[in-house]
Each structure stands twice: as C-alpha cells, then as structure tokens.
Image: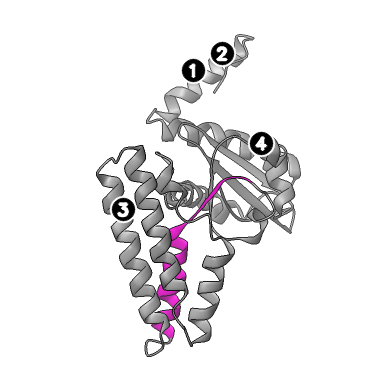
C-alpha cells in the first residue's frame, strides 16, 4: 500500500493505491490516516495477508502482519549520508545496503521453509548488531530508532514466500497515475474523484495482468451495455 497527494475541489486529498498479486485498487480520500485503511480493508482483526508499506505513521496503528520497505529505509540513509558524508550515517548506510543485497541474493536461490526461518534468525541477529553499535550522529541515531520501532517488520519477506522486501510495485503504479493529476490538477468534485478511482482500478489491474487495457475496456463496456454485471 502507498499514497500520494491528490487535489479535490481545491483541497488536499490523498490517492491510495493497494496492490495485490493480481489486483490494483485505487481509493481517493480526504484523510491520510489509519481510518482509511479500515475503509479499504475492514478492521485489522479480519485482515488476511501481509501489508507491505513504508514507515508512514498511518500504517502503525493498523495492527497486522507487515513488511516494511527496505528501499525507503536505504534511500533515507543514502540521503542523509550524502548530506553529511563525514559522519557515521555513511557507515550505517553501508551496513544496511550490504545486508539488503545479501537478502536479495538469498531469495533468488528460492530457499525452502527451513532455510528461510534459519536465515531470518541470522539476519535478525545481524540487524540487532547493527542497531546496537554506538552511533553518534543524530542522523544515524534517528534511523536506528526507526528500525527498532518496526523491529519485527523488516524480515517477514524472508520467512514468507512471495512477500517482497519493498513496495516498488506500488510506486510504479502510483507514478503512472500522477500524470493525469499533473494534466488536470486533480478533480473538482468528490464524485469525479470516485469515478476516476474506479476507472483507474480497472485499467491498472488489466495492465498488471499484462492485458490490453483498450481491449479489456471495450469488452467490459459491451457487457455493461448488454445489461450484464461484469467483474474485473
């Protein structure tokens, strides 16, 4: 799940994109809080699956099994390291980047369940060792605090197959939706925003499945005009 700003009638609303293995769901809402997640998924107790996201605070109260995005973490560390290359944040970025590359190489080998569990234990110990170093710069200390806050949400993708360590897929779909925002400047009405979200959900889903968006839309509308109720 990911979100980006979306103007509606001159006010700052938010476009949320939820990506699964075969669906893309777009939702535009005036709020950027965990309440939106409940609107989309229902109450957290009924949620089935793993929520992959960045460390934005809205996801924190939504108590489900989560995998935090490593690439967001690395980008933050790299940004701070470039600003203050002489401080220890550079070394922290180096350690985290090395660990991420190691995890990606491990997952490429298609490990079995026992290998995943054992390696997750080793990676957890390694991450703890990194966090327990006596970091001195404010940038490094703040980043370590973020890692510790989401202590159990960095290695879920190592244990559970098909759970990515990042939410790049979300970002790619959101970037494709930003173009119409730049062209039209958002929407003038709530109904227009709702209609756009419905259409975008269909188009992005067909695109994710590798289908022709034009062909699928024509077939979909043909069924609607024939009085049928087509599914996505």
- x and y percent of residue 82 in the render? 39, 81
- x and y percent of residue 98 in the render? 31, 66
Cβ atoms at labels 1 and 3 below 8 Å apart:
no
Mark 3 lies on a secondary structure that is: helix
Q: Which of the labelled discs sits on residue 104, or is there none?
A: 3
Q: Which of the labelled discs sits on residue 21, or is there none?
A: none
Real-space CA distance between mark 4 and mark 1, rounded to the nearest whole angstrom: 19 Å
Dot placed on the residue nearer the N-terminal end, 4 or 2: 4
| Near-viewer residue (166 or 182) | 166
Residue 2 is at least partly visible in this image: yes
Real-space CA distance between mark 1 and mark 3, rounded to the nearest whole angstrom: 40 Å
Real-space CA distance between mark 1 and mark 2, rounded to the nearest whole angstrom: 6 Å
| Near-viewer residue (203 or 106) | 106
Range of residues picked out in magenta: 64-83
Cβ atoms at labels 2 and 3 below 8 Å apart:
no
Q: Which residue in the protein does label 4 denote?
A: 195
Number of residues whose C-alpha sits closer than 10 Å to that of mark 3, classed few (under 14), some (14–19) or many (20 or more): few
Q: Which of the labelled discs sits on residue 219, or is there none?
A: 1
- x and y percent of residue 45 in the render? 70, 38
For this view, does 185 lie left or right of residue 31? left
Instruction: Tell me the residue at 35%/72% (across/down).
Output: 95
Dot placed on the residue nearer the N-terminal end, 4 or 3: 3
Instruction: Tell me the residue at 47%/62% (across/down).
Output: 72
**Magenta span contains residue 79:** yes
């Amino acid at each position: 799940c990911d979100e980006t700003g979306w103007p509606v009638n001159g006010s700052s609303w938010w476009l949320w994109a939820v990506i699964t293995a075969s669906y893309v769901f777009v939702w535009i809402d005036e709020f950027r809080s965990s309440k939106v997640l409940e609107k989309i998924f229902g109450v957290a107790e009924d949620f089935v699956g793993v929520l992959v996201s960045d460390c934005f605070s809205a996801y924190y109260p939504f108590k489900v099994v989560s995998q935090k995005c490593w690439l967001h973490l690395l980008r933050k560390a790299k940004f701070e390291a470039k600003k203050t290359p002489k401080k220890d944040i550079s070394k922290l970025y180096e350690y985290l980047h090395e660990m991420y590359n190691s995890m990606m190489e491990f997952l490429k080998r298609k490990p079995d369940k026992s290998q995943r569990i054992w390696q997750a234990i080793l990676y957890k110990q390694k991450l703890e060792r990194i966090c327990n170093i006596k970091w001195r710069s404010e940038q490094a200390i703040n980043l370590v605090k973020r890692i510790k806050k989401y202590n159990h949400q960095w290695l879920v993708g190592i244990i559970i197959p098909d759970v990515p360590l990042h939410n790049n897929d979300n970002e790619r779909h959101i970037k494709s939706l930003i173009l119409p925002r730049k062209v039209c400047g958002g929407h003038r009405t709530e109904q227009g925003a709702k209609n756009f979200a419905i259409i975008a959900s269909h188009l992005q889903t067909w695109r994710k499945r590798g289908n022709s968006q034009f062909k699928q839309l024509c077939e979909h509308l043909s069924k609607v005009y024939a009085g049928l109720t087509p599914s996505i």
